[in-house]
Image: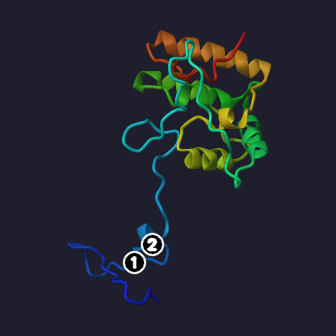
């Protein structure tokens, strides 16, 4: 059963035995807007940027949106950051501190920071907020989620490791997820 007046073209050069599956909607672009950017992937042509910093702030301070969309629960966002623990550290925070500013030479760092993420649950509310806010590794900052003391210490050490590899951690870019000893 199709949509009246819509063509079901399988594409030039494809065998005539191919047919659209019920899961594929050739008109999806007309009915569902695509996200402007994708959170938590490199900020090239498709990745979302980090939160911007307040202009001329030194040290950097983040420019945090004033409101959270009504369909987002900050309580869930913070719970998702805390749910995956590795050796007593809240992995959602350590992963956000490194993932979005990592380069190819930071593979081991990202592996250490993100190991165990999503092991004990989901991160759907985090991704929903980051998609709607069009930013990467930013949900904890927007919702005001705070890491515990062991996690802050780990973030601090991960940031130093990233600097030693000549990459600027998020802390240096916008003043967030800096950690503390």
Depicted 142 relative to depicted 153: above or below: below
Q: Which residue is drawn at the image coordinates 39% and 74% (left, top)?
A: 26
Does 29 sit left or right of 95 as displayed?
Answer: left
Q: Are marks 2 and 1 in contact (CB under 8 Å)?
A: yes
- Residue 20's label in the rendered image is 1
Q: What distance separates the C-alpha of mark 2 from that of mark 1? A: 6 Å
Most foreground residue, 171 or 121? 171
Q: Is residue 105 left or right of residue 126?
A: left
Residue at 46% across, 58% down: 34
- Disc ID at residue 71: none
Residue 97 position within the rendered picture, expressed as x and y whole percent measured from the top left: 60, 26
* Residue bearing the label numbered 2: 24
Task: Determine the residue positioned at 22% across, 73% down.
Answer: 12
Instruction: Give the secondary structure at mark 1.
Output: loop
Instruction: Give above or below for 178 relative to 40.
Output: above
User: In the figure, is residue 168 to the left or right of 92?
Assistant: left
Q: In this orientation, which residue lies closer to the viewer: 7 or 109? A: 7
Q: Quadrant of residue 62?
A: top right
Q: Please identify the quarter of the rendering in which residue 8 is found.
A: bottom left
Question: On the picture, is 123 further left or further right than 43?
Answer: right
């Amino acid at each position: 059963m199709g949509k009246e007046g819509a063509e079901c073209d399988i594409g030039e050069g494809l065998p005539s035995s191919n047919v659209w599956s019920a899961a594929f909607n050739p008109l999806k672009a007309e009915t569902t807007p695509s996200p402007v950017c994708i959170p938590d992937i490199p900020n090239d042509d498709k990745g979302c940027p980090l939160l911007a910093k307040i202009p001329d702030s030194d040290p950097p301070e983040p420019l945090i949106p004033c409101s959270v969309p009504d369909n987002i629960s900050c309580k869930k966002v913070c719970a998702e950051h805390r749910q995956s623990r590795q050796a007593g550290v809240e992995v959602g925070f350590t992963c956000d501190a490194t993932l979005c500013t990592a380069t190819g030479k930071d593979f081991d760092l990202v592996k250490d920071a993100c190991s165990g993420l999503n092991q004990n649950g989901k991160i759907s509310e985090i991704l929903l907020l980051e998609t709607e806010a069009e930013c990467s590794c930013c949900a904890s900052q927007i919702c005001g989620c705070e890491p515990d003391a062991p996690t802050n210490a780990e973030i601090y050490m991960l940031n130093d490791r990233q600097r030693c590899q000549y990459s600027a951690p998020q802390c240096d870019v916008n003043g967030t997820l800096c950690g503390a000893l």
